[in-house]
Image: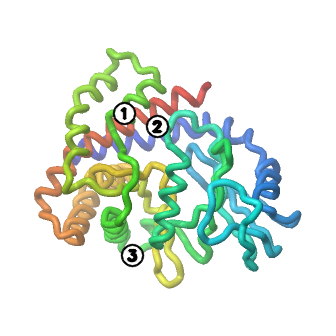
Amino acid sequence: MHCQLAYFWVTWALRYLAIISGWCNIRNKVNKLDIIATLQKALNLSDRAKISIHPAGAVNRVYRVQDPVTNPLLSRNGNHRSNNNQKLEDTPVDLAVKWMGDDDFSGVERQHQFALQQQLYGLGVAPQPIWLSDDETIWVERWQSHSESATFSSHRLPLYTLAKALARIHSLPVTARPLNLAARWLHYSDAAQLDISSELYLKAQAFRKKAIKSEEDDDDYVLCHNDLLINHLLISADNTVTIIDWEYAAMGNRYFDLASCCLINKLDNKESDELMQHYAAIMNIDEHKALEKFELHTEIVAITNDLWFAALNATKHV
């Protein structure tokens, strides 16, 4: 398992770097002046509103929009469509804005994501979602003021912090749409136009029944984040943790989420074992049984990851 895990994150990193240059050509087509003009109209921002680029991932582009003028911003309940009867708030505007216009492959249902994040905001876990454009290319949520991303270099106990965050997510009283790995794998395979004789397609078919069975385990069927990078944990001055980037969140097997977390954070064998030990202790789960289930899901996550990259690579040239 340990050698496989190391191989998985190395190949993930290489593929990530390989696609960045291709996506930059698409992302550079985004005109931030067009975005601010759209938000001025939709959210009644003033002419003094400013937009700045914020570091983001390979697919979506993220901006910070600030407006010092008192604004008819949305009520604290949020709304996924612009509304002429929005409640006034006497506070300056500080927003995180995602451009998602060129995501043709992920299969993320943005309206469902918005509704889910409204619930998560109500539970104090996620930022408040503010607005989703009708064409679902612009996502707006409140900027998390006075917060910084956790990192492995800056945070004292990053593995425990990750384990605690995962345990928190998996214990939330929220029901979302199912991850449905079999359908997701088929979607990625179709988007990637995989040949049915290809090694990746055949491997996915070989693991299909195991993936389906893993999602039928009621004891381990929980809300999963499925993209929990360490820097998706925002830590405020009072050590309150807010979790961001919920677009792949769904009901699924907890060990898929754990294996995914290890892969995308490039954890080595020792670190992965330590994360699992922390998680098992927090959740009062037998450590040995947890490690067995985790090992199976490293394979399932690796296939999902390979299919995701195949779909991304196929669609970035379109």
Residue 66 position in % (x across, y down):
75, 67
- Could you tell me which secondary element the residue under label 1 belongs to? helix
* Most foreground residue, 175 or 280: 175
Residue 35 position in % (x across, y down):
76, 50
Q: Residue at x 24, y 38 (%)?
A: 212
Observer-side mark, 3 or 1, equals 1
As measured in the structure, the alpha-carbon distance from the residue carrying label 3 to the one carrying label 1 is 39 Å
As measured in the structure, the alpha-carbon distance from the residue carrying label 3 to the one carrying label 2 is 30 Å
Q: Pick whichever of labels 2 and 1 is earlier in the sequence.
A: 2
Residue 225 position in % (x across, y down):
40, 55
* Most foreground residue, 157 or 97: 97
Amino acid marked by disc 2: Arg
Residue 165 vs residue 281: left or right?
Answer: right
Observer-side mark, 2 or 1, equals 1
Q: Residue at x 45, y 35 (%)?
A: 309
Amino acid marked by disc 1: Ala
Q: Residues within 10 Å of mark 1 (few under 14, many from 20)?
A: few
Most extreme residue toward the bottom is 238
Which part of the image, by quadrant, shows the C terminus?
Answer: top right
> Could you say which disc has been placed on residue 156 in the image?
3
219, above or below 29, in the image: below
Q: Pick whichever of labels 3 and 2 is earlier in the sequence.
A: 2
Q: Residues within 10 Å of mark 2 (few under 14, many from 20)?
A: some
Amino acid marked by disc 3: Arg
As measured in the structure, the alpha-carbon distance from the residue carrying label 2 to the one carrying label 1 is 23 Å
Which residue lies under the disc numbered 1? 183
Residue 6 position in % (x across, y down):
30, 46
Which residue lies under the disc numbered 2? 15
Identify the colour scheme used: rainbow
Q: Pick whichever of labels 3 and 1 is earlier in the sequence.
A: 3
